[in-house]
Amino acid sequence: MSKETNLDAEIRAESGKSAVKKVLAAGKIPSVIYGLGEDSLNIALDKISVQKEINSGGFLTRIISLNIAGKKSLAIPRDVQFDPLSDQPIHVDFLRLAEDSKITLDIPTRFINEESSPGLKRGGVLNVNRRTVQLSCPANNIPEEIVFDLDGLEIGDTIRISAANLSSDITPTISDRDFTVASVAAPTVVKEPEAPVEGEEEAAAEGAETSDDAKEASTDDAKKEENKD
């Protein structure tokens, strides 16, 4: 399950480009929280705290408990804007959540026990079709990743979404089929050029020399004919 993170936020009374510049200059990130039928609210977050959470990974799938003027608001980041030059975060959009909210997220896949797969041991290759899978999750039960076990898999075996150990309240948005997530494919064989049979190289060289001799003889004969003329 995704961890819940606590962040302090303050309300931004002003909006517009000049107000945003002031917030950024003060070491904070201008943000907005919306959803659940309530009005959008402009807020500001501590830049260092946000950067730390982004660097730890999985920021867009993490439940954030925002402390806004002493009131806790459950939310999830939906978008982060970065400065094109410094690559620092300059804006975050948050979606309000209720305890029973369901949201759709792209959750990363992870594969374990590669060393226990006979197919991979024999040189097989793990072909990953989906690095992420879109899931419908309750706000209080968001997985950080979808784990697939490769133990015992042979070359030609297919890993489907049904192999994931998901709770009953978490469902893939693709629900009409048991789709493929990855497979163990046969190794790619690179064909080496065949070595020449013993004696072929010498024969080829002799043939080339004979051809050159014939060309020289032909040239000499042509010159003799010209001299006669």
Image (cartoon, rainbow, N blue to C red):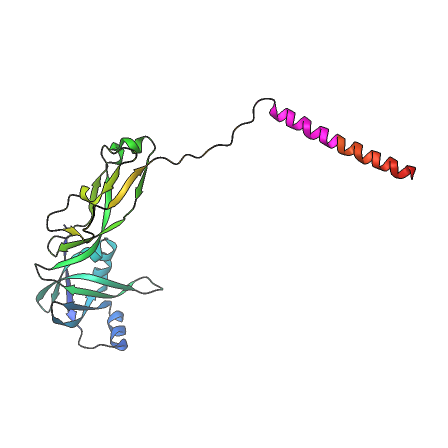
Residue 76 falls inside the magenta stretch: no
In the image, taking residue 98 as reference, residue 114 lies left or right, namely right
Percent position of residue 84, x then y: 34, 64
Percent position of residue 142, x then y: 15, 53
In the image, taking residue 5 as reference, residue 180 lies left or right, namely right
* Residue at 80% over, 32% down: 217
Q: Which residues are magenta?
A: 198-213
In the image, taking residue 211 as reference, residue 113 lies left or right, namely left
Q: Residue furthest top?
A: 198
In the image, taking residue 110 as reference, residue 215 lies left or right, namely right
Percent position of residue 94, x then y: 18, 64
Up the image or down, 195 lies above or below 175; here it is above
**Of the pair 1 and 217, the residue shown nearer to us:** 217
Image quarter where the C terminus lies is top right
Up the image or down, 198 lies above or below 187; here it is above
**Of the pair 155 and 26, the residue shown nearer to us:** 155
Q: Residue furthest front?
A: 176
* Residue at 16% over, 72% down: 40
Residue 201 falls inside the magenta stretch: yes
Q: Main secondary structure of the magenta part?
A: helix
The image quarter containing residue 28 is: bottom left
The image quarter containing residue 104 is: bottom left
Percent position of residue 176, x then y: 19, 50
* Residue at 29% over, 46% down: 129
Q: Count of labels shown?
A: 0
The image quarter containing residue 70 is: bottom left
